[in-house]
Image (cartoon, rainbow, N blue to C red):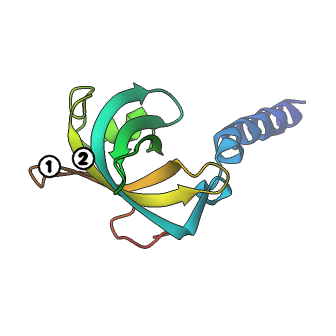
């Protein structure tokens, strides 16, 4: 009887540990690695929400038209472990963002790098400009 109980407990423990793995999804479901994006503009809002941080940036095109982009980043926990705080990037900051465009929404992208106007790199998601590394 004790052996069956231990086997049952071990099985339940293993099945519970796989839930976070199942819940995660690939960024390629929403974004296209063949659509590189580079945008320069002013941060209008930063949302520190789970599961991902969103940075909204007003980008002015060559015709003077302003478009608000939604850039998705890693989780708040991930960027905090890499030295960020909620004050690292704030509305009004001028940024250059490189990433990969959305599949369905053309003003949405996933961030690969964020650089401030003074040249400081704040975020490098993959370490290189190539997806999947």
Q: Which residue is mark 2?
A: 95
| Tag 2–tag 1 contact (CB < 8 Å) | yes
Q: Any mark on residue 77, and which?
A: none
Residue 58 horizontal/vertical position (percent)? 36, 39
Is 21 on the left or on the right of 55, as rendered?
A: right
Q: Earlier in the sequence, mark 2 or mark 1?
A: 2
The quarter of the picture where residue 29 lies is bottom right
Is 99 on the left or on the right of 1, as rendered?
A: left
Q: Residue at x 24, y 47 (%)?
A: 95
Q: Residues within 10 Å of mark 2 (few under 14, many from 20)?
A: many
Q: Give the vertical position of 109 relative to 56 (above or below).
A: below
Which corner quadrant holds the C terminus?
A: bottom left
Q: Secondary structure at mark 1?
A: loop
Q: Residue at x 37, y 70 (%)?
A: 129
Residue 116 horizontal/vertical position (percent)? 18, 48
Which corner quadrant holds the N terminus?
A: top right
Name of the residue lying farthest toward the left: 118
Res 80 seen here:
yes
Distance (Cα) linking label 2 and label 1: 6 Å
Q: Secondary structure at mark 2?
A: strand
Q: Residues within 10 Å of mark 1 (few under 14, many from 20)?
A: some
Q: Nearer the viewer, residue 52 or 3?
A: 52
Is 19 on the left or on the right of 118, as rendered?
A: right
Name of the residue lying farthest toward the front: 63
Q: Which residue is mark 1?
A: 117
Q: Give the vertical position of 16 relative to 61 (above or below).
A: above
Residue 68 horizontal/vertical position (percent)? 44, 38
């Amino acid at each position: 009887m004790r052996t069956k109980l231990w086997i049952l407990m071990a099985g339940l423990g293993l099945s519970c540990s796989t839930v976070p793995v199942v819940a995660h999804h690939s960024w390629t479901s929403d974004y296209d690695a063949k659509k590189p994006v580079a945008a320069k503009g002013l941060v209008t809002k930063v949302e520190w929400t789970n599961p991902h941080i969103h940075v909204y940036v007003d980008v002015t095109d060559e015709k003077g038209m302003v478009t608000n982009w939604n850039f998705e980043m890693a989780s708040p926990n991930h960027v905090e472990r890499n030295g960020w705080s909620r004050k690292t990037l704030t509305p009004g900051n001028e940024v250059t963002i490189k990433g990969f465009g959305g599949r369905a929404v053309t003003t949405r992208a996933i961030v690969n790098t964020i650089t401030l106007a003074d040249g400081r790199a704040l975020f490098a998601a993959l370490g290189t400009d190539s997806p999947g590394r």
